[in-house]
Image (spheres, rainbow, N blue to C red):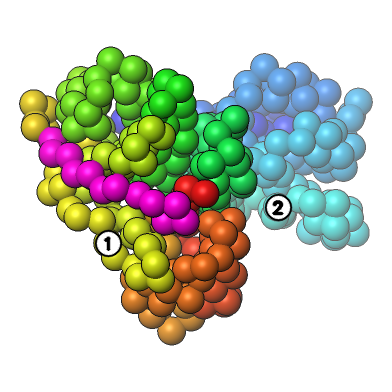
Amino acid sequence: MSKAFKILCVDDEPDMEVLIRQKFRKEIRKGVYDFHFAQDGRQAIDLLEEHSDIYLVLSDINMPIMDGLILLNEIQKLENPLIKVVMVSAYGDMQNIRIAMNRGAFDFINKPIDFDDFTLTVEKSRKEIQRLQKQFKTQEILKAVEDDLSAASEIQSSLLPKLNGAFKNFERLQVASYIQPARWGGGDFYDVFEINSKHIGFIIADVSGKGMPAAVFMFLSRTAVKIFSSLYKQPSEVLSAANNYLNIDNDNSMFVTLFYGVLNLDNNEFTYCNAGHNSPYIIQNGDVTALKPTHNMALGVFPDLEYNDASISLKADDKLFMFTDGVSECMNENNEEFAEERIIDLLKTESQSSVMDMVDKMEYALVKFQGDAEQHDDITMLSFELD
């Protein structure tokens, strides 16, 4: 059963309360209306402060202590846009009615009261109040969503190291990264971290979904890979353990496509495991080739999966370019995708450039291609080379 619509009637004539209760006795009995009464503006303000869910005020203009025009001003000071004031006055008092309407009254009713008109005015007021309530509720929801996405974006930013040049004390290893979050926040992340003095770990990933759930799952995914990388040697073992961890209490059915590789600085061997992510490209002697696939499922989909590794030997000046689907699926104003063909062409053109310049050129190409089209997904790149 819906809640009764509360109405405050303000009039110094005692007969008004008796008349209204008599005319609307059926509606009052059925819980359609809940009338409250005050004999002057001061009493009305007290009742409004006591009952925060009274949104319609029917007020006479001429009253002792505080008249209807002053009451209208006082109600506006409450700064509650849901409260609507309908002025009640005699036919001959059009000047005061005009003043009231100019000061923000919602409507007016003439005396003697025509109760058909009275009912129509009450219902019109109620519909407007209900419309505003829905509007404000929608705004509250949107604000909550925006706050959620903003918080998620902050988490995303806090996870991402700023990489542009030599990685820590490893002068031979040059690293470049780039991320441009979508307006509504996605779930891309990357990381480069020292496993030990001889091994460097690389992660690039894309979490399903958006907002706070994606941000939390992003944090869990990154943490799981980094923790298990200290316990297991092979990337496949790391991702198998991470996958089982991410399947625990995964009530939102979140998953993450993730590429994880380990660079051995002693022999330049790069061992990797690709869990459903875009295949990175290796740039060697001007040639651009996709890394050999490892045919693994994304993390978080099913537990107890076995993951496969692959390895490649790197030489000086070899480069590895990793990216998320926000790069290849970047759309322009004609709904065309940037596509991997453009990625390959640019990597070939920039094969002799540093990874920093290569990532910069890819960013420029994406911005130029996208034009004024809206960005729907995070755009993320991670690249490294050995000197």
Q: Residue at x 35, y 70 (%)?
A: 287
Say whether residue 233 is left or right of residue 99: left
Residue 254 at x, y = what percent?
A: 26, 36
Note whether 210 is above or below 262 in the view shown. Answer: below
- Is 6 displayed left or right of 1 in the figure? right
Q: Position of residue 174 (x, y in %)?
A: 55, 46
Decide which of tag 1 and tag 2 comes sooner along the chain: 2
Residue 253 in sight here: no
67 relative to 331 in the view: left or right: right
> Looking at numbered disc 1 in the image, what kind of residue is underneath it?
Ala
Q: Main secondary structure of the magenta part?
A: loop
Q: What stretch of residues is rendered in magenta?
A: 307-318
Q: Which of the 4 image quadrants contains residue 361?
A: bottom right
Q: Give the SS element for disc 2.
A: loop
Quadrant holding the N terminus: top left
- Residue under numbered circle 2: 106
Residue 41 image point, x, y percent: 82, 29
Q: Which residue appears at 8% of the width and 26% of the height? A: 304
Height in image: 282 above or below 212?
below
Viewer-closest of 125 and 194: 194
Residue 58 against residue 323 in the figure, above or below: above
Determine which residue is flagged by label 1: 290
Amino acid type shown at disc 2: Phe
Q: Nearer the viewer, residue 383 or 381?
A: 383
The residue at 19%/44% (across/down) is 310
From the viewer's side, name the closer residue of 338 and 7.
Answer: 338
Secondary structure type for disc 1: strand
Quarter of the view holding residue 283: bottom left
Above or below for 131 versus 83: below
**Left or right position of 336 against 33:** left
